[in-house]
Image: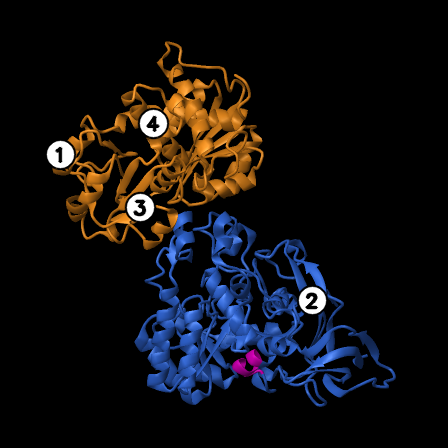
Chain colours: A orange, B blue
Amino acid sequence: MRPIRGGHLLSLDGVSRDQVLDVLDTAESFVEVNRRTIRKVPALTGRVVASLFFEESTRTRLSFETAAKRLSADVISLAVASSSVKKGESLRDTISTVEALGLDAVVLRHRSSGAAEQVARFVPHVHVINAGDGQHQHPTQGLLDAFTVRQVLAERHGTSGPESGAELFAGLRVVIVGDIRHSRVARSDIAVYLALGATVRVVGPGTLVPAEVAQWGVEVSDDLDEALEWAQIVGLLRLQVERGGGEFVPSLGEFSTHWGLSVERLGALSPDTLVMHPGPMNRGVEIAHAVADSPQSLVTRQVANGVPVRMAVLYLTVAGGEDR
Amino acid sequence: MNRLVLRGGEVVGPLGVRRADVLVDDGRVIEVGPALEVANAVEIDCAGSYVGPAFVDLHAHLREPGGRGAETVHSGARAGVVGGYGALVAMPNTEPALDSVPLVRDVLERGRSSVLDVAVCAAITVGRAGERLAPLADLASIGVHLFSDDGTGVANPLVMRRALEYARPLGVRLAQHCEDAALCEGGVMNEGEWSLRLGLGGRPAAAEEMMVARDLELVRLTGGRLHFLHLSTLRSLELVEAARAEGLDVTFEVTPHHLTLDESACAEYDPDFKVHPPLRPRQDVEGLRRWAREGRLDAVATDHAPHTPEAKDRPFDEAPAGLLGLEHAASLVHEALGENNPVELFRLLSRGPARIAGLDRRGAFGLSAHGGDVAPGEDANLVVFEPTATWVVDRTRLQSRATNTPYHGRSLVGRVRHTLVRGQLRVREGDLR
């Protein structure tokens, strides 16, 4: 994969272990910033970050904008609903217009797969950070998921994330459940876990787990309960009803019965097994209400870790790892 | 002065190649032979080049009426002659669709004032809606030989059956775009490992193959005649070849892009690589090339599909499908054939398609005859192709109004030097005259 430092972050496809660790270790150093009274460092003072969300996403947008502000960057935010995009302006023209205002980085969310890649071609000297493109990739989500797992496992082992490196991922058993086909989170999670040395299994309805997934180096399982018993990490995915995911299963009820993490299934898990979900959750579909709030659920930690991980990504891409 | 002598080239016939000069006068080939002694003729240097029948494209989207921003009959014709074509078949998926005599006549009229011969493939159904038959008999009576709803296929098997039956006694041929629309829903590239990795909706090979299989059964049922447009998978070719061995009257074409590009070209989300049927896996590309080298293809057709930059300059999933073909088709076919098979090059680009389009004889629409031998008495539709010349595709220097070529910057071997249409030298040393 192309370098993250001084470059773009478009995808985690082909990311190396060292690249992932670089981001995770950098993020670790920003965790402390978020605990201070004055939650700000001057790392990106005078730099301009544009947050362009062509698809609604309150949480990811807030997370990125918070991260940019904590690095002292100026944030330009394009509200698509009131913008010229609605008037038929092309992606290229929108980006060129924003670029003309002078900027260092673009954080881009778009409903089309590959949009971040295209924007990186339109404005090659601007650092482009993919905040989710269609059904392709959501790299910062993958990184924050890995960061969260490492943080929790390190706590258990009485060590710190940076000290442990990728050690705690060696042979770690991860199962990802549900709508693999439409999920950009699944693609980024699988890439990052494999890069760190974990073993990844996927399980879900036949319509949502295409056979070609096996070529990614993951195991495809037909048995959710066996996979859950095997797993140390359970990654749930949002059933992408809005992307047509609902047509791929007979009903949400059937999906929930056969592939949802119910209270009963939670009870059958080892107490050490961790449950993750990128949000927003369909409570009662892929995750039972009580499971989302159980002690094994890392959902709120994932949200909290979004800020330091995105700070790390902004810092590494924009400042290229210059000395702070 | 219309008297020309093509000097020192290798004349390509259906069986082989021989060194000969070709004298052309008054739109016809007058004499073919070594070291012709000719006075008062323009001398055209053809040394080191093949001389053969000008190419015929079975499948060109010329965008008139309704799409003049992307191409016109005249600009498409200029792109054609530069690419070595003497005749193009204009496809009917225009706005409105070419489904009536007046609309077809209008395109033919524009063609008559263009630099080459333009024939028309008319729609099978009214408005290409796949419901009611277009006036096939009226259209056949003015010389239309091919009918297609291309862009999409005729989805309803009953409508397709009726069309095959109705067309049969008219002596015309239907042409089908085979991709089952329901199975392709949301698909923007070949379905497989790449589409999954890129998060792009897939168009499975099966969508093409099941429609080929269905239509073969309908041809068997009706005794009709059918041409398969732009077949892109090895399995499709096998199905058609097997059916033909049983005696069905079916023909097919493949495109230069399916012979030279595979699905991995979509990895950078460049919409210039988006096309229907989609670029397929490497095994299919290699399979198609193998068939080309084994002489098992009927014809190569470009599916030349111009789009304006603003239409293509969108995210991959939103951009229209289609790419340019006319100006680099011959070089690509030459490459696919291993750069040393002139007889097959001219069969695939000229003789084969001329026969399928009914352009191998004079008369249809008042056009001249194409795809014949380079022999005295034949209409002088000729191309001179230099097999060892190399050139680089530059999208800013195309004759087409559009720029959506996937080959921009690619170095190609083999180039059209001269094109003659009805004895007129339209292209000389690569330049439009």
Left or right relative to B129: residue B29: right
- Whether residue A286 is visible, yes or no, is no
Which tag is nearer the camera, tag 1 or tag 2? 1
Residue B257 picture location, percent across and down:
54, 63
SS category of the residue bearing label 2? strand
In the rendered image, residues at marks 1 and 4 fall on the same chain: yes
Chain holding disc 3:
A
Residue range corresponding to the magenta coloring:
B352-359
Residue type at mark 3 is: Ile
Circle 2 Cα neighbour tier, 10 Å, few/some/many (<14 / 14–19 / ≥20): many
Q: Which residue type does callout 4 highlight?
A: Arg
What residue did someone put label 3 on?
A180
Distance between mark 2 and mark 4 Cα atoms: 59 Å
> CA gap, disc 3 to disc 4?
23 Å
Q: Nearer the viewer, residue A291 or B422?
A: A291
Mark nearer the N terminus (3 vs 1): 3
Checking the image for residue A132, the label placed there is none
Residue carrying label 2: B415
Occupied quadrant, residue B105: bottom right
Mark 1 = which residue? Answer: A267
Task: Using the rendered image of the protein, determine whether residue B318 is visible from the camera's viewpoint.
Answer: yes
Q: Any magenta on residue B226? A: no
Circles 1, 2 touching at the beta carbon (< 8 Å) = no
Q: Is residue B23 left or right of residue B331?
A: right
Residue A309 location (% of width, % of height)? 40, 26
Question: Residue, x 51% and y 63% (percent of image)?
Answer: B66
SS at circle 1: helix
Mark 2 and mark 4 on one chain: no
Mark 1 → mark 4, Cα distance in angstroms: 24 Å
